[in-house]
Image (spheres, grey):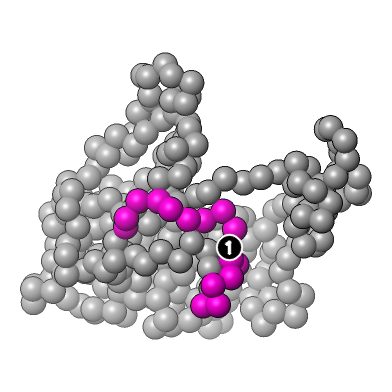
Amino acid sequence: MAIRPSHVKTPGLRGASFDDFSDITKKAGEKSLMIIKKKHSGRNNQGKITIRHRGGGVKRYIRIIDFKRDKFDVPAVVSAIEYDPNRGARLALLSYKDGEKRYIVCPIDLRVGSQILSSKDLIEIKNGNAMPIKFIPAGVPVYNVEIEPGKGGVIARGAGNSVFVMGTEGNFVQIKMPSGEIRLVKKDCLCAVGQVSNPDRRHLKIGKAGRKRHLGWRPTVRGTAMNPRDHAHGGGEGNQPIGLKHPKTPWGKPALGVKTRKPKRKSSKFIIQRRKK
């Protein structure tokens, strides 16, 4: 993927940039693998806003993606590379010999016509192939890594992400996360070889507020611009500092740089080295 700068010199688009979509080979999605995305505007089943600043946006369809890669030992051919509005990475449309089609998160350098495979045994180490992480040599990047065998990949699915295998320790494999954290996962967990596609997405610049609204984001008001009853940073005449030793959330809890992980979380025993701040 390449980033295309805006050549329009209006105030909103002067610093904006866009994806040129040069790697997309098919515009329309596979209808059998799409469902409508229902809008909730950040509200729960009681109608209360639990996620602020969400609402509006263009109509979207959810692509049903195969994160489990559980169609074992059946070769598949990449028939298209597609855009997904719900994530930064590209999707690869696979066509299996029995006629079934599935979406997977596309790795870098996967091309239309490539043949890939998913297996519980050792297979060729090449982009897109899925196998248990115990078969991956140290230093090879992988993505879509499972935490529990058979539950589907949850680690390293974002654009440009990958995980590196550090070594094997008994029934576990040490992996280095994109954050720098080193943790253990069970050696029978599946993973896919490669790095997630579209790494240049982090260089995109939105440019104007309207483009953010199209993505489903509503305006965010600064706490210092509110009244004291509405935010811990609020109040005062004119521009004032927050008047606190540390920043707070609207509900008075510490914010910005505060550790939020529960100290007694069960999975903490699998973390060998915490991520860097």
The residue under label 1 is 51
Q: Could you tell me which quadrant the N terminus lies in? A: top left
Q: Quadrant of residue 67?
A: bottom left
- Foreground: 102 or 97? 102
Q: Residues within 10 Å of mark 1 (few under 14, many from 20)?
A: few
Residue 139: in sight, yes or no?
Answer: no
Q: Which residues are magenta?
A: 45-60
x and y, in percent, of residue 75 in the image: 16, 70
Instruction: Report the side of 147 relative to 23 (left or right).
Output: right
Instruction: Report the side of 215 relative to 66 (left or right).
Output: right
Asked whether 44 falls inside the magenta stretch, the response is no
Which residue is rendered at x = 76% and y = 46% of the image?
Answer: 226
Which residue is rendered at x = 42% and y = 48% of the image?
Answer: 215
- Foreground: 67 or 204? 204
x and y, in percent, of residue 65 in the image: 30, 68
Q: Main secondary structure of the magenta part?
A: loop
Q: Is 177 situated above or below 190?
A: above
Q: Is 233 situated above or below 92?
A: above
What element does badge 1 sit on? loop
Which residue is rendered at x = 56% and y = 81% of the image?
Answer: 170
Residue type at mark 1 is Ile
Q: Is 95 situated above or below 81?
A: below
Asked whether 59 falls inside the magenta stretch, the response is yes
Instruction: Report the side of 214 relative to 268 (left or right).
Output: left
- Foreground: 152 or 86? 86
